[in-house]
Amino acid sequence: GRKEKARQRKASTTTKMRVATRWNRTNTRHVDARKKRESWKCRARPDGGGRGFGEDRTKGEGKASTSKKDTSRARLQDVMDNRRERPEETLWLPDSHGWMEQCPCGGGENRSATYRQCCEPLHKFQTWAPNPLTLARARYSAYVKGCTDFLVKTNHPMNPDLKSGKYEKEVKAICEQVKFTGFLPVGVDNASDKECFVTFIATFEKFSGPPTVAMEERSRYIFEDGRWWYRDAVEVNMR
């Protein structure tokens, strides 16, 4: 009778209120998320060029939209370009341990490899240099990093510098007294399958003396026992 109808009306009203409450909560979440997105789009970028990642405003040209991916890629490219223009600086990831440090030899043939990708495996004897130019690069990086063990063990036994028995001490002294600032390969001359000449220019600064010195060296490398060895310096010119 009347009690049953009242109970049904109450149950129907309760169900409608529950549905309305659930819809309001969901809609509120969507509204809050949309507001956050709009506030991020309207937030000015630090460089002052446009607003947010969603749009880019320039004077007299209206709006030009760019995606997040394109903007991030452009910023990374700017950083790398700036790094190549100033090779004396080292690029670091803020929380890294040298993962993004460019190799002292210039980053290999593509000029973008990090030290861990380029010369560090050679310095740790995890692999051997596949060609004389790579060995020349690795030896230069070893001077920068102070890897005297690598410099000694990559010498051919016939190297005249080893006869004095003071080669390792001399190398350590060079690493302590000189700051190397650049490596530039000039040419590679393959005399035969077992002998090769590499010409390069290395720049460095002495802690006492001229501010910058450029050394042009023509080195000889010998292929023996399945790997390349540094034989000696055929010609050295200081600039």
Image (cartoon, rainbow, N blue to C red):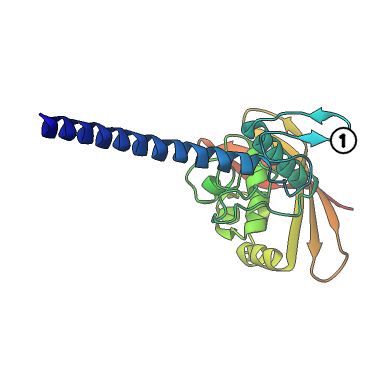
Q: How many neighbours does mark 1 have within 10 angstroms: few (below 14), some (14-19), or many (20 or more)? A: few
130 or 46, which is in the foreground?
46
Q: x, y percentage for residue 119?
A: 59, 46
Q: x, y percentage for residue 237?
A: 85, 50
Q: Residue furthest bottom?
A: 208
Please, what secondary structure does the residue beneath circle 1 have? loop
For the question of whether residue 72 can be seen, the reply is yes
Left or right of residue 187: residue 129? left
For the question of whether residue 109 can be seen, the reply is no
The residue pinned by badge 1 equals: 59
Q: Which amino acid, by three-letter code, is at mark 1? A: Lys
Placement of 175 over or under 124, stated as above or below: below
At x 16%, y 35%, the residue is 7
At x 54%, y 46%, the residue is 122
At x 62%, y 58%, the residue is 145
State the quadrant of the N terminus.
top left
